[in-house]
């Protein structure tokens, strides 16, 4: 009896350790992604910026962070769209992509549907990440950028 409870405790401990390890492993790309979003928001001129780029880190707050991230992503795309229009550059700031990504995140919260939405959500997340980095490079390469090293 005693040996069985010790074994159960050990396996539960290893299981908890594995879950924590996987969670920490998942946070690594999330940090790089949030850093990209922060830099993109900071690249938008201040008059078109919805709020400071550093507020993306509130997405790490459990439960409410998911809602905040959805709001942040939509406002980032909206800010990008305004900034691109002001600079007379093409693009919608990734707004339609962001809406699709946010919808996939919402679907991940619904039991059983989340199994179907997982792969599209991951694909949209990667595409969104790349698109936001591209928009940041475009904005930083044009006059009127928030980057003080550039003229305008």
Image (cartoon, grey):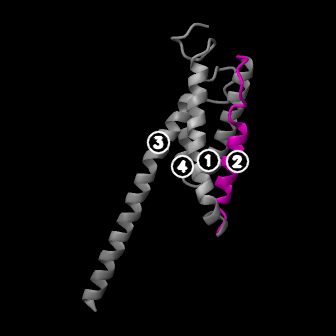
Q: Is residue 65 visible?
A: no
Residue at 60%, 35% (x, y): give it: 131
Q: In this view, does 84 lie to the left or right of 23?
A: right
- Viewer-proximal residue, 114 or 27? 114
Residue 81 location, x and y as percent?
A: 72, 28
Q: Distance between the residues labelled 1 and 3?
A: 17 Å
Q: Mark 2 points at which residue?
A: 100
Q: What element carries label 2?
A: helix
Q: How far apart are marks 4 and 2 (CA)?
A: 23 Å
Q: Find out whether residue 29 is within the magenta segment.
A: no
* Mark closer to the observer (1, 3): 1
Q: Can residue 58 be seen in this view?
A: yes
Q: Find out whether residue 97 is within the magenta segment.
A: yes
Q: What element carries label 1?
A: helix
* Mark closer to the observer (3, 4): 3
- Viewer-proximal residue, 77 or 70? 77
Q: Mark 4 points at which residue?
A: 61
Q: Mark 1 points at which residue?
A: 124
On the rendered image, what quadrant is the N terminus found in?
bottom left
Q: Do the residues labelled 2 and 1 touch (CB within 8 Å)?
A: yes
Residue 31, numbered label: 3
Residue at 64%, 30% (x, y): give it: 51
Residue 36 location, x and y as percent?
A: 52, 34
- The quarter of the picture where residue 95 lies is top right
* Mark closer to the observer (4, 2): 2
Task: Tell me if residue 107 comes above or below residue 4 in the rendering.
Answer: above
Sequence-first tag of 4 and 2? 4
Q: How far apart are marks 1 and 4 (CA)?
A: 22 Å
Sequence-first tag of 3 and 4? 3
Q: Do the residues labelled 1 and 4 touch (CB within 8 Å)?
A: no
On the rendered image, what quadrant is the C terminus found in?
top right
Q: What residue range appears in magenta?
A: 87-111
């Amino acid at each position: 009896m005693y040996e069985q409870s010790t074994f159960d405790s050990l396996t539960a401990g290893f299981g908890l350790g594995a879950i924590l390890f996987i969670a920490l492993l998942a946070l690594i790309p999330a940090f790089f992604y949030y850093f990209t979003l922060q830099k993109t928001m900071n690249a938008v001129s201040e008059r078109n910026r919805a709020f400071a780029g550093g507020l993306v880190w509130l997405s790490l707050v459990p439960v409410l962070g998911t809602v905040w991230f959805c709001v942040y992503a939509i406002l980032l795309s909206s800010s990008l769209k305004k900034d691109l229009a002001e600079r007379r550059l093409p693009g919608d700031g990734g707004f339609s992509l962001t809406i699709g990504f946010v919808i996939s995140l919402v679907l991940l919260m619904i039991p059983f549907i989340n199994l179907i939405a997982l792969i599209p959500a991951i694909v949209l997340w990667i595409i969104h990440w790349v698109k936001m980095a591209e928009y940041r490079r475009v904005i930083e390469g044009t006059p009127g950028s928030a980057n003080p090293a550039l003229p305008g």
